[in-house]
Image: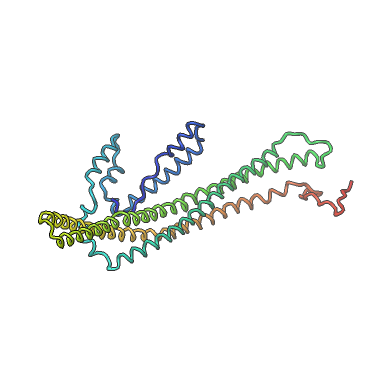
Amino acid sequence: MTGRAMDPLPAAAVGAAAEAEADEEADPPASADREFIEARRRALKRFVNLVARHPLFSEDVVLKLFLSFSGSDVQNKLKESAQCVGDEFLNCKLATRAKDFLPADIQAQFAISRELIRNIYNSFHKLRDRAERIASRAIDNAADLLIFGKELSAIGSDTTPLPSWAALNSSTWGSLKQALKGLSVEFALLADKAAQQGKQEENDVVEKLNLFLDLLQSYKDLCERHEKGVLHKHQRALHKYSLMKRQMMSATAQNREPESVEQLESRIVEQENAIQTMELRNYFSLYCLHQETQLIHVYLPLTSHILRAFVNSQIQGHKEMSKVWNDLRPKLSCLFAGPHSTLTPPCSPPEDGLCPH
């Protein structure tokens, strides 16, 4: 159904060139495979969601078979069902009357809608890129916090003996190591909170933006198919008809043989029928575009859900991490022992640079 907005299926595998290079040099890293599989899984999920939610596709027999069939020969069954699905223009009862359901300025409306969707797509594409970076920073922050805590734990677990000329006594150094080691628990918890926030924003913000972008991209592709397909063929048919009419006028003026004139007249009648069919297809294509434009606007309120999910994730994430930071702060009091068992950091050196004995 080329008259509907629908993205092609996501790529099933890495490009042949990349595979050949990987086979020659070395096996691709497992992390790259996992990332590709996860990205394709998400793309397939978005594809199925858009197809299943489409008003027309949701009633398609092939889709229903794909979602419900559980046998081993699913591919053969799908092929058999697909053979029964013909051209939507030929099967739709409204195809020949599509012009009656369109506004008089449909061409102008089409141009405006296409420009609007293009602008929306460009803005949402930038929003998606920024949302990806925000979620990625949260995950990177989680990794940094975890490493930070592990290094504190490594210092606390160090068994190297304290040298005799050290400024700290052994008991103070032992207390300091124990305190540093204890702080690693809070940093691990902070890392977990940051990772949760990043994953939540990937699922609730980035993925929903990707879903809307897939729909917008499919609409842009549909507009391009309309202009390069039906509209272009219609214009070519009109041009061919114009040439035939000129040939007919020239043949009549030159008093050519009746058989030659009759053949030319027959070709002109055939071309007129082809033009009529092309014109009907053109209006039906615009009718489908009109419906797909309405579908885009039905999805626009998704923006508020995305923003709400983003704001809630930020509030929840900062709230939970703030609590952990506040719980961690009192534990810093045992890092440096002062005269009355209070913590005092090392004093700054005098301005003359000379340290007292």
Q: Nearer the viewer, residue 319 or 272?
A: 272
Q: Nearer the viewer, residue 290 or 154?
A: 290
Q: Nearer the viewer, residue 228 or 289?
A: 228
Is 246 placed left or right of 333 in the picture? left
Which residue is drawn at the image coordinates 15% and 63% (left, top)? Answer: 253
> Residue 352's spot in the image, x, y percent?
87, 53
Above-or-below relation of 76 to 246? above
Above-or-below relation of 179 to 313? above
Which residue is drawn at the image coordinates 45% and 57% (left, top)? Answer: 124
> Residue 31's spot in the image, x, y percent?
51, 38
How many numbered discs sit on the rendered protein?
Answer: 0
Observer able to see residue 94: no
Above-or-below relation of 162 to 45? above
Name the residue furthest left: 258
Is 203 placed left or right of 195 in the picture? left
Is 33 placed left or right of 77 in the picture? right
